[in-house]
Image (cartoon, rainbow, N blue to C red):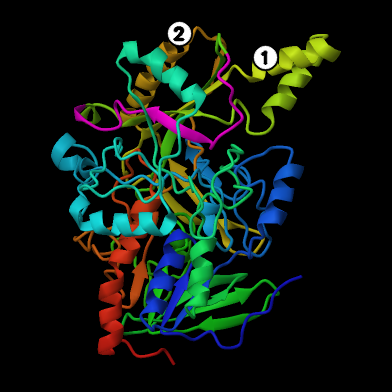
Amino acid sequence: MNKSLEKDLTADVVVVGAGAVGSMMAWQLAQKGVKVLLIDAGPRIERANAIQHFFASAEKGPNSPYPSQPYAPHPMHPQDHLVQAGPAVFGGSYLRGVGGTTWHWTGFSARFRPNDFRTKSLFGVGVDWPVGYADLQELYLFVEKQWGTAGDSAFDQGGPRGGAPFPLPKVPMTYADTLIRDALAPLGYTVAPFAHARNSEVFDGRPACCGSSSCAPICPIGAKYDASVHVAKAEAAGVRVVSEALVEHIEVGPDQLVTGLRVRGSDGQRAVATGRAYVIAAHAIETPSLLLRSAQANAPQGVANRSDAVGRYLMGQVDLDTRALTREPIYTYRAPTTTAGVLELRDGPTRSEHGAIGTSFLNRGWRTALGPMQRSAHLIRAGLRGTDLARRLSDECARELAINTSVETLPSASNRVVPDAELRDASGMPRPRIQFTIEDYTLRGIEKARERHAAITKALACTDIETDTPSVASAIIAGTARMGTDVLTSVVDPFCRSHDHANLFIVGTANFPTMPINAPTLTAVALGLRALPSLQADLTAGRFPLSA
């Protein structure tokens, strides 16, 4: 049943996007007494319903628990929502719904490294950020405590903690991790545990991880953090949350202040959301699409786009995946999706030659939830039946090794997202048109990854080795509303405020000038929270009147 919009969509601050960044910003503002309206194009997501969708799916892809809705569509496959203009296919995955893409993220709570903010100065590639590690360190710790981050203080993954322990005990490495660690040590590889936004013990009313190995796309019990946690806390603090509310257009006045958002409900009704300040936290694909399709007399190139940088510098990570059967059982299909990875080449001088390389081992086996069924079908075709089939299936599933390496990409103005001039999605909005090239810098990293995968499979005496074609297929998407101090080349300032519109803040991974190999969510939230003192000071001073 479609949902009607509320009649009164007025607040001090209107936040668009109820994901990780938007929900925590709204919650923090409400705790300061600010009247906040948090709107999301997608629906409320009920975990039990999502699990049933996942069970029923024949694909088990990242969005299989979260069907695309006609009033707010999102990609189910690389070609069905995003218009691929080439030359490379950009298969980035995200969803629209209350809680956002954290519903299907892996749950890595990784800080960026100090070097990640200075790649131009240190390695001669990319650009330097206008903020550094020290600017985010306290915010990192604050968010980690809110999420209930579990980690091993002996392995900070390159993000110095200043003596602060992880809030929760570490999630243990798996039996497979330890076997792989021991096999790779003679090769000079260090296999170490990751930090997780995942409960290793009961925390914040949520249970400890049960090891279902389906974190991506869904944690069945809520042990993995997702932003619905802070949506609920925001509502308890007084935030009004409105779901199924698609922002069609941003209105800008002659003084260059945003005056309202034209919103459409899932039932087709329209209204205008108004506030004193506005925060766009709608993800690195939908954010530039909204800004650019809002071109008007007072913003002829699109909102916040006098620099012509909106939609440009799109980044992701290029993945290389290898599957093999180990000689000895490693017992996958249990534990969180990924618990450990190789430390080497994630940072360091080699970044002047090729992209940073992050290799990890997947506890979900070859094919998330489908592997045993597909293997069973293969063995049946080979003539096995009964006890022989069961024994062989158990043996081979226990030996499934899945290696994933992600390689850094660099910002390029020609890698971009724009609203398609002709093609429309189910909601009637222009589909996002993606133009993306994988540069030699990244391809050189991919070749190093191939060498690493070959060394790993040899060390584990693997057979049945298969390596996929490199692809951009993760939920790591960044760079389309970049942060900077130069108004001619960036979209927002170091506090996420639009250079063009003083009462507009644009937050999320779209702000990133570069996209290193660590997971981006923790840094995106830290940057959003860093914007709040400036925004709150404006409200206290009465800088912006309430839009009429």
Q: Which residue is mark 1?
A: 395
Residue 291 point in image, percent of width and height: 43, 66
Residue 162 makes an appearance in the image:
yes
Q: Secondary structure at mark 1?
A: helix
Q: As displayed, is residue 167 above or below residue 530?
A: above
Magenta-colored stretch includes residue 348: yes
Pick whichever, 82 or 60, lies toward us: 60
- The kind of residue on which mark 1 rests is Asp
Q: Residue at x 39, y 90 (%)?
A: 546
| Residues drawn in magenta | 329-349
Question: Residue 492, located in which quarter of the rendered image?
Answer: bottom left
Mark closest to the chain's N terminus, 1 or 2: 1
Residue 10 point in image, percent of width and height: 49, 86
Q: Quadrant of the N terminus?
A: bottom right
Answer few, some or many: residues within 10 Å of disc 2's Cα (few below 14, many 20 plus, some between 14 and 19).
some
Q: Which residue is mark 2?
A: 458
Answer few, some or many: residues within 10 Å of disc 1's Cα (few below 14, many 20 plus, some between 14 and 19).
some
Q: Are marks 1 and 2 in contact (CB under 8 Å)?
A: no
**Dominant secondary structure of the residues highlighted in magenta in the image:** loop
Magenta-colored stretch includes residue 478: no
Q: Residue at x 42, y 31 (%)?
A: 340
Observer-side mark, 1 or 2, equals 1
